[in-house]
Amino acid sequence: MSWNTIESDAGIFTQLVRDLGVSGVQFAEIPMLDSLEELAPSLYGAIFLFKYNSSDYSGNGPMQGAYNFDYPDSLFFANQTIQNACGTLAVLNTLLSLSSEFPEEIRLGDTLSEFTSFTSAFKDPVLRGESISNSDHIRNVHNSFSTPDPFVLDEKTPDDGRKAAEVFHFVSFMEHEGILYELDGLQPAPIVHCEYSNVSQDKLTFAQNIVSLLQNRMQLCMNSGGKFSVIAIHRDAIERLEELHHQGAITDQDYQYEYSKELQKREMWGKELSMRRQNLYGLVFELLKQISSSMTEEEFANHIERAQKTTLKRLKRRN
């Protein structure tokens, strides 16, 4: 029944929503914030990963913007009610809200359409969060991109002298009915950023507003360690290319080049996901426990030393 931690990765998020039945949308790594403006014509929003700091959630209001407890019914907002689900929650909050504005571009599929219909009567974000946490299908898809950490599961007592592990959190930014919202599952309500909202819903201005907002947010979060990641949510690249080609906006040569480049990227994503799903880390750990359980500490140390020497010999032969 647990939820595993998944990486902040565009390929993972793209495949995750596809496995949930969503089509017409994908994700992209953003190495520099200005790259968001390059995606402006097809940009839907952004997922922001940052180091969690409890002090950021201890005040009466958010770090930026203001709570909107009277948000429209078409905006889907759920609280995070379980650990390790914040990435998937940020994606779902965003897509389920965007689908009402872009129904022809963002197609939810049967699973999430039924889920949206089921939770439509729930205005309470906690109930919506519990509905996500209790969905076997959503949890199974989420967990398919990682394996449980055997060291965490096997640990009986915490080591008080050990440095606390870094905890990261996902939030999303998107525009809904001309208003720029921040959807953070740890907050009581969606956050409105009026100073960055764009009533005209111009795509380039929307991208520039998100860039400006994230720049300011990163400055505020520098005291927490300054580790960030941004992933864009945008229209399916192949669908966008086909539309531009049909309109005559790009040449046949450019279409073939960009189409081939997109297929290569997706092939690379597929290989990386396959390696994650074939991870034998847990099996190796369990075998090591069984082998070492009958050894003394000295015998185990001798085995480690022999294994290290053998590995070094193999590396020298390979070189």
Image (cartoon, rainbow, N blue to C red):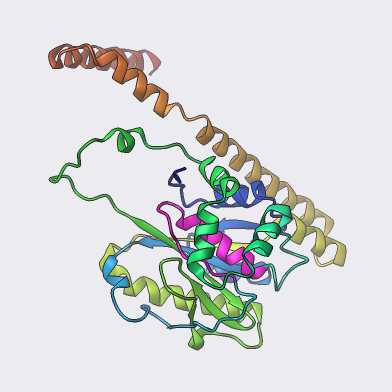
Q: Is residue 19 above or below residue 91?
A: above
- Asked if residue 229 can be seen in this view, the reply is yes
**Compared to 253, does 222 lie above or below?**
below
Q: Position of residue 183 (x, y in %)?
A: 50, 70
Task: Please report the residue visible at 51 percent of the width from the left and 36 percent of the height from the top.
Answer: 276
Residue 103 position, x and y percent, is 75, 67
Which of 196/238 is in front?
Answer: 196
Say which residue appears at 26% left-offset and 35% top-offset: 155
Highlighted range, magenta = 76-98
Question: In this rendering, does residue 236 appear at all?
Answer: no
* 315 vs 77, nearest the viewer: 77
From the viewer's perspective, is residue 226 above or below residue 262? below
Residue 238 drawn at (x, y percent)? 74, 54
Residue 139 in the magenta stretch? The answer is no
Looking at the picture, does residue 76 appear above or below residue 108?
below
> What is the x, y in percent for residue 306?
23, 11
At x 55% / y 85%, what residue is drawn?
197
